[in-house]
Amino acid sequence: MSKKRLKVLLIVEQCNPDWASVPLVGYNFFQEINNLVDATLVTHIRNKSALEKHPEYEKTIYLEEGKLAKQYYKIVEKLTATGRINWPMYHALNYPLYEQFNQQVYQKFKGKILNGDYDIVHAITPMMPRYPFKVVSVCQQTPFILGPVNGGIPFPPGFQKTARQEFVQFNFLRAVGRALIPGYAETYQKAHKILAGSQYTLNMLKDLFAIPDQRIDLFYENGISEEFLNQKNILNKDISKINLLFVGRLVPYKCADIVIESIGKLEPEIQSKIRLSIVGDGSEKNNLENRVKELNLGEIVSFAGWVNQQETLDFYRKADIFCFPSIREFGGAVVMEAMACGLPCIVANNGGIGEYVNEETGFKIEPISREYLTQELTSKIKLLVEDDRLRESMSAKAIEKAREFAWENKAIKIVEIYEKMLGEKSVSVST
């Protein structure tokens, strides 16, 4: 007799296979969990056109927004996107739009939850630990799981200039939100299980809400798709050079400038052996291009601009070393992708990316100061360029480590958490 599939309500406000970042992560979680359980997806109407390309997702509920909300959304986009996005302000101004969705989820599903229609309620996005979920108030008998949530990571003390460029002065809005947003504390106090996407966020939430160990787990939000794990022979790879790679938005805290400075500090003999490709676009691109000219690195450093995911995959596969000294990275999906393609990774040890990389798969550098990070990055690049055996060993270990993050494996672990929660519920009821 086949095992009965769990009935799960998945709340994924941002769930879109055509978009990047959180909406794509939300979609990947939904897609793989949906393969293992009887899932009902509730999401925003903005995702409808993308999800309707997949008619197999029958149990999808789209929540509408009014004309006023649509106009407000456009205003928020304009106010916060002035070259670089002011993320603290963006999240604060976006809250009224999210709250409309939050209230609609509650009104539409509270009766079904109270009626026991679902075995589990799982809220996946938004992923930042700043927004409430009102349905937690009706989940007394139905286990409610939240996350993975990630964020709140501070800038390293030695990078305050970069912090100001990234609008750190608006971070007080987080504390204001925690104090004023209805249901925020209740969400974390009543959730049966919270998944935190980094050790920093886990510790922060435990301290803020006195959450006991058994109610919170470390669970990284990013995953790896099969196309990254299925290795293919690379045609046209330049084997006469060691190919370095940076992938990410060209904004101050991602620190592509530090990669360029590090290349500039290498001895001419090492420089002659390498190439650096910078994949991405953003407000710092002109400054970075000018710095390459100043350092006479035009023969070594090239800018690919923004490229789609398939082209990005080609860059990973043609590279040998991944350089990503971003100083404030919550998830850092690009590091997982690089590892999946067999690249030793050199990263800054602050946030999620410092937790993916270990001594077998690359190097993590303490972001003590800009000078120290640059110096150490130069040293690690030199070491990997000169030591073929070390590079090959780290490459093999990186692929092995990345397989742990395959989306299918992550979904299996999520369902195991569901089953454990239901088992604990049964024990508590029987006793």
Image (cartoon, rainbow, N blue to C red):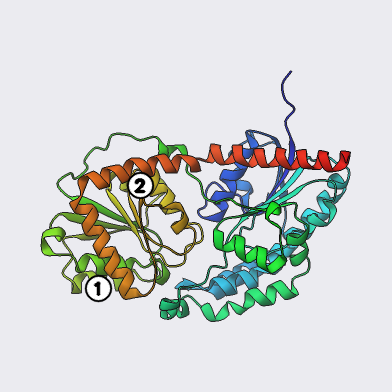
Residue that lies at the very extreme toward the top in this rendered image: 1
* Residue 84 place in picture, x, y as percent: 46, 72
Q: Position of residue 283 (x, y in %)?
A: 39, 71
The quadrant of the rendering that contains the N terminus is: top right
Task: Give the SS element for disc 1.
Answer: helix
Query: Residue 89: which quarter of the image?
Result: bottom right
Residue at horizontal 65%, vertical 38%?
416
* Quarter location, residue 51: top right
Quadrant location of the C terminus in the rendered image: top right
At x 49% / y 43%, what residue is drawn?
405
Q: Which residue is mark 1?
A: 290
Say if 367 sits above or below 43 in the image. Answer: below
Q: Secondary structure at mark 2?
A: helix
Separation of disc 2 and disc 1 at Cα?
A: 25 Å
Give how far across and how far down residue 86 sits, in percent: 53, 73
Q: Residues within 10 Å of mark 2 (few under 14, many from 20)?
A: few
- Do we see residue 64 in this rendering? yes
Q: Nearer the viewer, residue 273 or 404?
A: 404
Q: In the image shown, does 410 or 350 lie closer to the viewer?
A: 350
Q: Earlier in the sequence, mark 2 or mark 1?
A: 1
Query: What kind of residue is marked 2?
Result: Glu
Please, what is the three-letter code of the amino acid marked with disc 1? Asn
Asked if labels 1 and 2 touch by Cβ distance under 8 angstroms, the answer is no
- The relative height of residue 127 versus residue 236 in the rendered view (above or below) is below
Residue occupying image coordinates x 63% and y 73%:
174
Q: Which residue is mark 2?
A: 311
